[in-house]
Image (cartoon, helix red, strand yellow):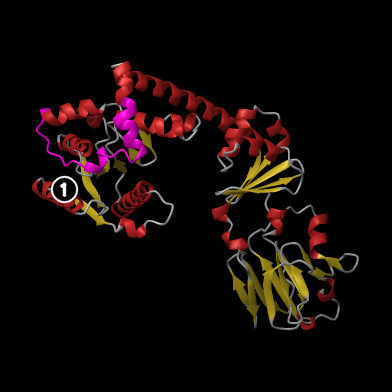
Amino acid sequence: MQESINQLENKKSYLLAISGGIDSMVLLHLFQQTSLSFSVAHCNFNLREEDSLKDEAFIREYCKKNKIKLHIKSFDTLKIKQKQESIEMVARDLRYHFFLELIKKYNYNYLVTAHHLNDHIETFFINLFRGAGLKGLSGIKKKRDYIIRPLLNFSRKEILEYAQNNGIIWREDYTNQSTDFLRNKIRHTIIPNLEDIKPNFIYLAKKSLSIIDESQKFIQKQVNLLKDDVTLKTDSNVSVIDLHKLLNADSLLIYLLLSEFGFVNKKDCENIVKSKTGSIFLSKTHKLWINRNEMWVEALQNRTIYESEINLKINSIPWEIDHPLHVSLYSSKKHEKSESHEILDLNTISFPLYFRNWKSGDFFYPINGNGKKKVSKFLKDLKIFNYEKNKTFVLCDGLDRIIWLVGYRLDDRFKITNNTTDLLNLRLHKKHTSN
C-alpha cells in the first residue's frame, strides 16, 4: 500500500480529499510517510448536525498538530439541493467544484481521493442496475485527468488492517450504515452475500473489472479510429461527418460514436443515421443536422455568440466590433484593395446603419445578380446549411434596406459608379464561412 504512494511523482503537488473516515485517514497517513508535497481539503456538508461539526474539528486538530496546510469549506447542502435532485449527487458536485477551485488557485497538480477496491466494485453494481454499457461497468478509473486514486487496488479489509496496525484514528459516519442509499444496500447486503458464496469474491471481481476495462479501452480505440476516418472537417464549433462512410461502419461503433454526442438510445441512433436532409436532433450536449451525405454536429455550449439576438445601431463611422464577427466600417475617398474588403457608395446610404441577424422575409438585390432575391433563397442556392445560416448577418441602412449580406454579397443598389465621390469601406477581418 505504501509502495503505491511512493511511486507518485516527487516534484508534483497533491491535494488530498479528506473526510475524516478510515479510508481518507489511511491515505493521509500514507502521504505523511513520504517527502511528497501535499495539502488537505475537507468539505462540511452540514448533513449530520453535530457530527458534521465534529468531523471538521477532528480534521482541523489533526492538520494543526501535524502542520499540514488545510482548506475547509462549509455548505448549506439542503438549501442548495433542488427538487428531484439526489443529495449524494449535490454533495458530489459541490465537493469536486471546491476541489477544482483549489487546484486552480494554488496550482496543485493532482487531486488524490481514497477510493478503494470495494468502492470500485460497488460502482460496477450501481452502473449495472442503471443498464450501463462497458464504459460504466468498467467502474472507477485509477487516474483520470487531474484525479488519482492510489488505493483503488486495495480492499476495505486491507485498509482496516493498515489502520489498526498503525494506530490510526478516524471518524465514523453513521449514514454509511443506512440502507436507504443504493450504494449502502450493495455494500451491506449484496456483496456480503456474494462473499458467503465465494469468499474470495472481491479479488475475482477485481480481475473481471480489469478485463472489462481493457475491453473498453480496445473498443474506444476502434471508436476513435472510426471518428478520424469519417470526420471531414472540424473547428471549435462543429464537426462534419461523412454519413456514407459512417453507415458502412459496424452498428455498435456507430452507436458508441453518437453516444459521445449525448445520443444514448440505440434505437434513436439507428433512426438518426437514416434520416432525411434537414432533420435536426438535440441531445443535452449537442445539436445534430443531416445535410445530404453529411452529418453536422455542434456542441451546444459553443453556440451562444450566434444564437443570441444581435441588433446593433451604428450612428456614425468609423465603427468596429469583435463579436460575433470582427467587422469594421470606415469612409474614404480612395479605393483600398485587400482581402475581405468591400466598398459601397456612401452617399446612397441612409444613416443610422444596423448590424443584425438575417431573418425570414429579408430580401436584397445581389450585386451582379438578376434583381430582387430573398436572403433565404440566396443562401439555399449557395448550399449554405442551417448551421452556417445561424451565423449569417446583414448590414442595413436607416430605411431597413440590406446593403451587405455580411461575408457573402453586396447590394447592387449601393454599388460604386463613375460618379461616386465618397466610399463606405466594409471589412470582415475574420472569415465567416468554414473551410
Q: Is 186 one of the magenta-colored residues?
A: yes
Which of the 4 image quarters holds residue 314?
bottom right
Q: Position of residue 307 (x, y in %)?
A: 62, 62
Q: How many marks?
A: 1
324 and 430: which one is in front?
A: 324
Q: Is 315 placed left or right of 419 in the picture?
A: left
Per the image, label 1 sits on a secondary structure element best described as helix
Residue 259 visible in this rendered orientation of the protein: yes
Whether residue 127 is in magenta: the answer is no
* 28 w.r.t. 341: above or below: above
Q: Give the image location of residue 34, x and y in percent.
A: 17, 35
Q: Where 366 sits versus 185, above or below? A: below
Query: What residue range appears in magenta?
Result: 165-191
The spot of residue 344 in percent (x, y) is 77, 74
Please tell me in which quadrant of the rendered image residue 384 appears.
bottom right
Near-viewer residue (300 or 350): 300
**Which residue is nearer to you in this view: 347 or 253?**
253
Q: Residue at x 62, y 61 (%)?
A: 306
Point 71% across, 73% down: residue: 425
Disc 1 marks which amino acid?
Ile
Q: Is residue 112 above or below residue 158?
A: below
Residue 345 image-quadrant placement: bottom right
Residue 338 in view here? no
Q: Which residue is mark 1?
A: 59
Quadrant containing the N terminus in the rendered view: top left
Viewer-proximal residue among 253 and 382: 253
Q: Check the image and report above or below for 80 versus 311.
A: above
Residue found at x 29% / y 18%:
196
Residue at 29% x, 47% y: name it.
108
Question: Left or right: where does residue 281 sit relative to residue 370?
Answer: left
At label 1, counting other C-alpha atoms closer than 10 Å, the crowd grade (few under 14, some 14-19, many 20 or more) is many
Q: Residue 198 at what x, y percent from top left?
A: 32, 16
